[in-house]
Image (cartoon, rainbow, N blue to C red):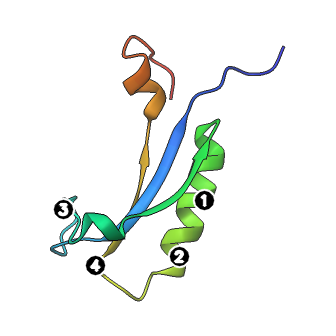
């Protein structure tokens, strides 16, 4: 039996301010959808690749969204 699918989304874009705690995008129409992944490890690899590709732009930030937790809030998986 295959591992349970735990949906993770990776998105990113330019933030309105540079801060370690900032998470407001400057322009939502320009948010990049990197992909949907069945597990955290694959999502993290995609996040890391996207983040490293934009390392010279301090306003760019990528996030991993644990969509499986939104779909099933009782889930305590990673």
Q: Mark 4 packing: few (<14 Cα in 10 Å), some, or many (20+)?
A: some
Residue 42: x, y in percent? Answer: 66, 47
Q: CA distance from mark 1 to mark 2?
A: 10 Å
Q: Earlier in the sequence, mark 4 or mark 1?
A: 1
User: Helix or strand or loop: what does disc 1 sit on?
Assistant: helix
Q: Residue furthest right?
A: 1
**Is residue 64 or residue 21 the one in the foreground?**
64
Q: Which mark is residue 59?
A: 4
Q: CA distance from mark 4 to mark 3?
A: 10 Å
Q: Earlier in the sequence, mark 4 or mark 3?
A: 3
User: Helix or strand or loop: what does disc 3 sit on?
Assistant: loop
The residue positioned 42% from the left and 22% from the top of the image is: 71
Labelled pair 4, 1 in contact (Cβ < 8 Å) = no
Q: Which mark is residue 22?
A: 3
* Mark toward the viewer: 4 or 2: 4
The residue positioned 65% from the left and 25% from the top of the image is: 5
Q: Which mark is residue 52?
A: 2
Q: Residue furthest front?
A: 29
Q: Mark 2 packing: few (<14 Cα in 10 Å), some, or many (20+)?
A: few
Residue 43: x, y in percent? Answer: 58, 49
Q: Badge 1 is on which residue? A: 46
Q: Residue furthest bottom?
A: 56
Q: CA distance from mark 2 to mark 3?
A: 18 Å
Q: In the drawing, does residue 63 fall left or right of residue 20?
A: right
């Amino acid at each position: 039996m295959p591992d349970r699918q735990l949906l993770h989304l990776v998105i990113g874009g330019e933030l309105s301010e540079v801060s370690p705690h900032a998470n407001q995008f400057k322009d939502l129409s320009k948010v990049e959808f990197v992909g949907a992944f069945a597990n955290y490890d694959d999502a993290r690899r995609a996040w890391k690749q996207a983040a490293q590709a934009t390392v010279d732009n301090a306003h760019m930030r990528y996030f991993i969204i644990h969509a499986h937790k939104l779909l099933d809030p009782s889930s305590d998986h990673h």
